[in-house]
């Protein structure tokens, strides 16, 4: 009886510590995104209106480029686990610290520059017509993967996907580093285009 109580206690402690570890790494991911969210959007979002806006004159495109406030971005609120080949070119050994997918709270990231909308709000059709009709300043869609950290959890990498249509999209690797207790972007690298 005493042995089974000890085993039960040891099992409970192990389960609790594993759960606490997952929560700690999720909290770390959220902290990183809090620190780099705005600069990541700045670095990876292309304005759909100028990128695919061949119907506009040069003067109209120039005017749109200057119109940088309150751009609407469809954002996939849950992060995702990147594909197996995402890390294949990385020389540093990054790894997934947990496989728990969680949701971004978009309200905290909205600014005068970006009006983030849940990508589930409207259908993502081939032409994105619903988004363009409802939001004249619609700039496209973004999604962020989970962060893959080094062993010391001082550097990391995550994937950003920009969506602008069925044959229109870009993928990026975003490298981050903890400097003076704040996470910052080291490099943004385009890894694919369609």
Image (tube, helix red, strand yellow):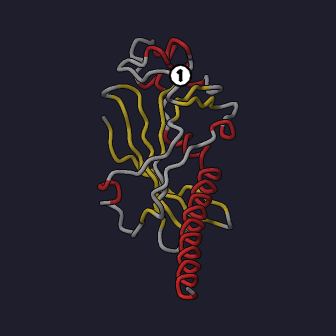
The picture places residue 135, in percent across and down from the top left corner, at: 56, 17
**Relative to 168, is 16 above or below?**
below
Q: Nearer the viewer, residue 5 or 48?
A: 5
**Relative to 128, is 42 above or below?**
below
Instruction: Determine which residue is flagged by label 1.
Output: 138
| Residue at 51%, 14% in the rendered image | 60
Q: Nearer the viewer, residue 145 or 15?
A: 15
The picture places residue 27, in percent across and down from the top left corner, at: 62, 58
The picture places residue 44, in percent across and down from the top left corner, at: 49, 40
Farthest-out residue, bottom: 2
**Left or right placement of residue 184 versus residue 101 in this view:** right
| Residue at 70%, 30% in the rendered image | 112
Q: Which image quadrant: the C terminus? A: top left
**Left or right placement of residue 147 versus residue 17 in this view:** left
Quarter of the image where one finds residue 87: bottom left
**Left or right placement of residue 136 versus residue 86 in this view:** right
Q: Which image quadrant: the N terminus? A: bottom right
| Residue at 41%, 32% in the rendered image | 163
The picture places residue 10, in percent across and down from the top left corner, at: 56, 80
Element on which disc 1 rests: strand
Farthest-out residue, front: 1
**Relative to 42, is 55 above or below?**
above
| Residue at 59%, 69% in the rendered image | 16
Looking at the image, how many numbered discs can be counted on the residues? 1
Decide: few, some or many residues near mark 1? Use Cα within 10 Å; few <14, some 14-19, many ≥20.
many
């Amino acid at each position: 009886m005493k042995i089974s109580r000890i085993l039960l206690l040891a099992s409970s402690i192990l389960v609790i510590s594993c759960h606490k570890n997952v929560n700690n790494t999720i909290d770390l991911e959220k902290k990183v995104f809090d620190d780099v969210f705005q600069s990541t959007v700045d670095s990876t979002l292309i304005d759909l209106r100028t990128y695919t806006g061949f119907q506009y004159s040069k003067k109209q495109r120039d005017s749109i480029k200057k119109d940088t406030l309150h751009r609407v971005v469809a954002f996939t609120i849950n992060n995702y686990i990147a594909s197996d080949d995402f890390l294949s070119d990385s020389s540093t050994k990054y790894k997934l610290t947990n496989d728990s997918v969680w949701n971004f709270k978009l309200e905290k990231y909205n600014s005068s520059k970006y009006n983030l909308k849940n990508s589930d709000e409207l259908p993502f059709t081939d032409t994105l017509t619903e988004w363009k009709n409802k939001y004249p300043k619609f700039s496209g869609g973004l999604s962020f993967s989970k962060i893959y950290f080094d062993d010391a959890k001082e550097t990391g990498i995550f994937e950003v996907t920009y969506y602008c249509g069925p044959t229109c999209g870009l993928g990026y690797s975003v490298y981050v580093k903890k400097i003076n207790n704040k996470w910052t972007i080291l490099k943004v690298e385009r890894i694919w285009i369609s």
